[in-house]
Amino acid sequence: MKKLHLISLSIVLCMFALTAGARTADVPEPPAIGATILDFTLPDVDGKDHSLNSLKGKHGTVLIFIAVQCPVSNAYNERMEKIAQDYQARGVNVVGINANATESAAEVKAHAAARHLTFPILKDNGNKLADSLGATRTPEAYFIDAGNKLIYHGRVDNSRDTAQVNSSELRDALEANLAGKPVAKTTASAFGCSIKRAD
Amino acid sequence: MLSFKILTARVKLATMFIVGLACFSVLLLNVAAAAQSTARAATQGRTGRVAKPTVNARAVNGEELQALLKRDGKRPLLVNYWATWCDPCRDEFPDLVKIDNDYRGKGLDFIAVSLDDVADLKTTVPKFLRELKATMPVYLLNVSDPEPIISAVDRQWGGAMPATFLYNNQGEVVYKHFGRIKTDELRAAIEKLVGSKQ
């Protein structure tokens, strides 16, 4: 009988200890660096579907979650466009992803035209791609190589103020990969606007 | 008869295994808790004291912010990371002001950490706080690279704003939320801390 009590007490204590930790937020986990990103299909701002494989460059793709109304994302418009132009010629295509439920395809299209963003922008309705990639903020970048393997995930650089930029992790990852070298810093975080997910 | 004895022996063996496994788990958890307690004791001397309520924000660096997050075993702490340029941050701020008013007297410390530019320290930030009649201590995080402090605050947090963390009086995160707060959920978490002794 004593043994039975001991077993019950131990199990109760174990269960209590396992459930007594901090309550975690409902945050999707991003894939690990090196993981293969599955092909997906999303509509562009005109409603035409595109797959990852149809948009990727010879040496890969940079997906960047962007926003219409986020001041941080908007501070990066010129930098994102420059990256798109610089690396398209070198075989890496930039694709913008808008996963904000609060921003319509028409708004995204008008915003891209006004801010001179020439790279394709897809609308992630229902934030399914954002969920599968664990994207939480704008801007947030994912560099995927030609084999759809995740090479880098995180910020474009260290500051939304161009005068304060002293590390450009996304460009560093692109340069390293194109040179056939390992990427020194595979993740980097920064403050940004939360993605407004669908309820 | 022989097979019955073998069966009995196997049952005893299985029981001993389960008891052993359960006890080992409890032992491991106790050792981990003791290690945490020792680590906390080592940092008690550097426990940060939250400044008196004011509508003016004060600039802090990453180390100063981490010191502010430390607890001295007396009062739990609510921390909200926000910016005047962040719409959901502005939307939720009136709810946070109410929470501060409702729970400060019940033993909850609350600090708001602004991620605005330093240039906004004397202008946009205090103007917004005055408009909302906010009187909790406000600090403006002034760092050239935000990554170390984001990682130090929470490894699960990528820097999306707003972000809200509730620490118990030992400095452990007991609740966190990224994005606009769910007021009822946050209040329930606070009630658990200030409504009963920890």
Image: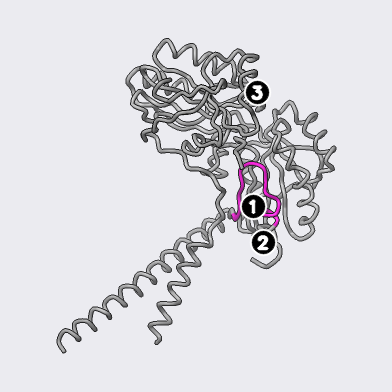
Question: Is residue A104 found inside the magenta-colored segment of the image?
Answer: no
Q: Residue at label 1? A: B166
Q: Could you tell me which secondary element the residue under label 1 belongs to?
A: strand
In the image, which is nearer the foreground, mark 2 or mark 3? 3
Q: Could you tell me which secondary element the residue under label 3 belongs to?
A: helix
Q: Chain of mark 3?
A: A
C-alpha gap between disc 3 and disc 1: 36 Å
User: In which quadrant of the rendered view does residue A191 lie?
Assistant: top right
Name the residue located 38 percent from the left edge and 26 percent from the top edge: A183
Q: Residue at label 2? A: B193
Out of A65 and B16, give the one closest to the viewer. A65
Which residue appears farthest toward the bottom when viewing the image? Answer: B1
Classed neighbour count for the residue bearing mark 3: other residues with Cα under 10 Å, few (<14), some (14–19), many (≥20) = some
The reply to whether callout 2 and callout 3 are in contact (CB within 8 Å) is no
Q: Residue at label 3? A: A107
Specify start and end residues of the magenta stretch as a single range.
Answer: B174-187
